[in-house]
Image (cartoon, grey):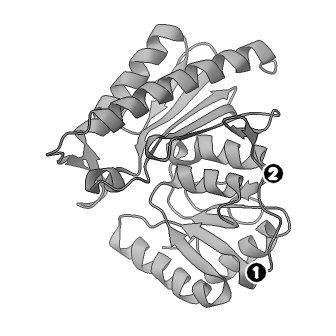
Amino acid sequence: MNAPTDALKAELLTVALEAAERAGALLRDGRPADLGVAATKTSPIDVVTEMDLASEKLITGYLAEHRPDDGVLGEEGASTPGTSGVRWVIDPLDGTVNYLYGLPSWSVSIAAEYAGETVVGVVAAPLRGETYRAVLGEGAWLGDRRLRVRPAPAFEQALLGTGFGYLTARRAAQAEVVRRLLPEVRDIRRGGSAAIDLCDVACGRLDGYYERGLNPWDLAAGDLVAREAGALTGGRPGAPASGELTVAAPPGFFEPLQARLEELGAWQD
């Protein structure tokens, strides 16, 4: 399959931006005062709300209207193969627990893949008033500002972001990694939205980010934003970012961070 044309990438970006804006407005303005848990997934604390479902329905409906031949993979169950070579990877509400509790760090994450490669990524964070976007080979942007990662810091001066899974054994293993890593760096933050964390690396608000257990919809858009802002992303040494491990950081810091996470077994439960 040929590489995507500039016209196709521009069209996919326009569709992603509009879908994310609409979903973000729905989530921001339509949150019920009595919002509760609609379902659970991997554990009793891995929750889904009615608004996760409503956001995914809005996004998939918009995509079906404007790009009916594309495939879709969504966190809340949307899955169609498509025939165009384009597949949308959607997290309709990344940071559901934050949203449930009324905390502001949640986002809508929409990525478009062409022939298996992510070519467009959009992350909308409505309560920040920010939408991050990236197109493969064309940079990452926040409004009119082109995003660039921070210069690589000394390891002991790094501010890191991370997250935790919902299974008890995994959380215990992740806590042990933090216990050992925290004395070695400036500090560690846990924001609650992987998509926002990756965009914060792109913006220079974090020096690096790592997490085990992400799904494709958690990282697809944010990974592209980070890479187009100059970050390196990956998993264990020699492996791409995946559910086993995702690491993002500027060149010069990515390598020692990845190596230290390997030593600490950050990819193990």
Q: Are marks 2 and 1 in contact (CB under 8 Å)?
A: no
Q: Secondary structure at mark 2?
A: loop
What's the distance in space between the residues labelled 2 and 1, CA to CA?
18 Å
Q: Residue 55's spot in the image, x, y percent? A: 35, 31
**205 w.r.t. 9: above or below:** below
**119 w.r.t. 238: above or below:** above
Q: Is residue 154 left or right of 221 when viewed as pictured?
A: right
**The N terminus sits in image quarter:** top right
- Picture disc at residue 155: 1
Residue 267 occupies which quadrant of the picture? bottom right
- Picture disc at residue 232: none
Q: Is residue 234 left or right of 40 when viewed as pictured?
A: right
**145 w.r.t. 182: above or below:** above
Q: Residue at x 27, y 46 (%)?
A: 48
Q: Residue 262's spot in the image, x, y percent? A: 68, 76
- Residue at label 2? 230
Q: Residue at x 68, y 43 (%)?
A: 225
- Total marks placed: 2
Q: Residues within 10 Å of mark 1 (few under 14, many from 20)?
A: some
Q: Residue at x 48, y 17 (%)?
A: 63
| Among numbered discs 2 and 1, the one appearing first in the sequence | 1
Residue 167 occupies which quadrant of the picture? bottom left
Q: Residue 168's spot in the image, x, y percent? A: 34, 73
Q: Amino acid at mark 1?
A: Phe
